[in-house]
Image (cartoon, grey):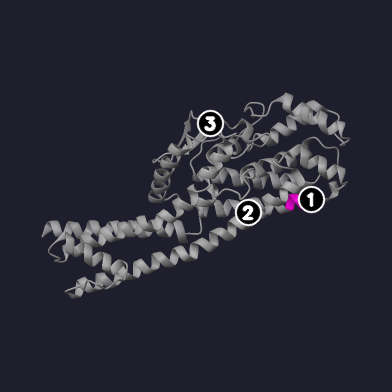
Amino acid sequence: MIIRVLMFVLGAAVVGGTLLSATRTFVLPRSANDPLTRVVFVAIWSVFRLRLRWARTYAERDRIAALYAPIGLLSLPPVWLALVLAGYMGMFWALGIPSWREAFFLSGSSLLTLGFASARTLPQTMLVYSEATIGLTMVALLIAYLPTMYSAFSRRELAVNLLEVRAGSPPSAVELILRFHRLKRFDHLHELWETWEAWFAEIEESHTSLAALVFFRSPQPDHSWVTASGAVLDAAALVASTLEIPRDAQADLCIRAGYLALRRIADFFRIPYNREPHHPADPISLTRAEFDAAYDELARQGVPLKPDRDQCWRDFAGWRVNYDTVLLALCRLTLAPYAPWSSDRATGELRITYSGRVAESKSRGNV
């Protein structure tokens, strides 16, 4: 008798934990790092990593990695349904079903609403109804979840695609400034910063509450939401620190919205970084020589620049230090394509472990 009571409690705990996992993943409108969802995605990624080892080019790696997020997402409902089935098996057995085989048939029939097995007592009948309700709810959640996710993905990719017109492909902060200069549209930069401030705010919410979006790759292999973020942030930092044009506080707001969004996505994946960085105490991945090359190129193209190059570098580095670490970490995590000042220096692979902590791989880089 005690064993049956314990089995009923264990089965109910498995079902309750599964429902909590589905609620955190599909329903909860905030960041929630669910252990079961993480285990599923990490297990699937372990299989993908084996295949990626044989990829010789980035194009091949991109084609393989593009399937990771969809397969991981579609694997969640079967895992949840299997756990619910197992939990109800234990409860049916505890309520008098004589064998595990019959408990399996009754649980499966109830969960999938097939109706080929029937309950014998009122308590068993109540469990059958509750399991059927859970099964239908799981399917309904997935149906409602996918359109929401792809709507957020489409809005994200619209801005990424439009950036190619302004910043080239791969996106470059220097190229963005040069194109606005050639078109004599520096007065329209304010609109760009406003658009991307709103974009950063949206991905902060969508890429933590719908975490699989982080790994959904762009339709174009050379596009990435991470490298696009880096190009816009670097362009805003260059404008705020280096260009001799009327100061626009909107550029500062765009940078702040950007690094806060990247940091909170990094928080979700438990990526470590310094929350209060300061330059020059905290170095950045961009070197002074690279900044000087960008300064010289802008000057050669006639872009109005502040004369004190040393102060420009200090101001630029003071902005970049806020997002440098998380930008490169997210490039590694998502296997982002090549882009200057971001994924070009994000070598190696950043992967999530079963404990939720990040680990650095010594495998080939992502560029």
Q: How far apart are the two marked residues, 3 and 1, measured between alpha carbons? A: 36 Å
Identify the residue at horizontal 57%, vertical 54% (top origin): 205
Q: Quadrant of residue 124?
A: bottom left
Identify the residue at horizontal 71%, vertical 43% (top origin): 232
Q: Give above or below for 99 relative to 196.
A: below
Residues drawn in magenta: 190-194
Q: Main secondary structure of the magenta part?
A: helix
Left or right: where does residue 253 sit relative to residue 58?
right
Dot 3: element: loop
Q: Which residue is mark 1?
A: 190
Dot 2: element: helix
Left or right: where does residue 334 sit relative to residue 25?
right
Q: Which residue is mark 3?
A: 348
Identify the residue at horizontal 77%, vertical 31% (top origin): 294
Identify the residue at horizontal 54%, vertical 33% (top origin): 56
x and y, in percent, of residue 55 in the image:
51, 36
Mark 1 closeness class: few <14, some 14–19, many ≥20 residues within 10 Å: some
Dot 1: element: helix
Quarter of the picture holding the N terminus: bottom left
- For the residue marked with disc 1, what is the amino acid? His
Residue 279 painted magenta: no
Number of marks present in the image shown: 3
